[in-house]
Amino acid sequence: MVEGDKARLIAWGLELRAVHTRLREALHVTLDAARAGETTALPTRELLLFCHGFCTALTGHHQGEDRTLFPAIAAEHPELAPTLRNLEQDHAMIGTLVAGFETSLGRDLPPDQLESHLEGIAAIMESHFRYEERELLTVLGTLALDANVADVLGPL
């Protein structure tokens, strides 16, 4: 393996952590916008923009993993099939929570209820990210995947 190949392989683990960090930051910005909202008004335009950006980024990240990253891992590491299934189940659960949150934005809900939706997403998302990093970072250091990072980990 030449030095450039080694750097590319190590980069997948670094990229995964970087994407998780950016998604955490996007969630915190969205939570701050929800907390700053008026108790009687529909969500502010700023909150809607933050929520749309966060929800789109999180969904895109999980779709990229399901479509490209996890099949590549499964091909090289079939022993990780149960772990990948767990991660895909997490993606489905988070997707359901995100869809519920997006639906709640169209209702006249007070900010504390919107914040509760986001806190639920945050709890599952954080647990998922930690599990994913714990189980896959070592594997990502050896994964032979020649693909665009944005296609694999989402357009962040």
Image: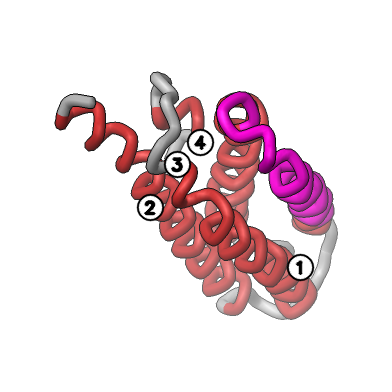
Quote the CA–CA distance across marks 4 and 1.
23 Å
Label 1 or label 3, whichever comes before in sequence order: 1
* Residue stretch in magenta: 74-100
Residue that badge 2 annotates: 18
Categorize mark 2 by other alpha carbons within 10 Å: few (<14), some (14-19), many (20+). some
Name the amino acid type tagged 4. Answer: Gly
Q: Please tell me which residue is depicted at 73% across the width and 39% down the height of the picture.
A: 81
Out of 68 and 49, give the one closest to the viewer.
68
Residue that badge 4 annotates: 154
The mark closer to the camera, 3 or 4, is: 3
Q: Please tell me which residue is depicted at 76% across the width and 52% down the height of the picture.
A: 90
36 relative position to 104: left or right: left
Q: Are marks 1 and 3 in contact (CB under 8 Å)?
A: no
22 up-or-down from 82: above or below:
below
Quote the CA–CA distance across marks 3 and 4.
16 Å
Label 2 or label 1, whichever comes before in sequence order: 2
Query: What element does badge 4 sit on?
Result: loop
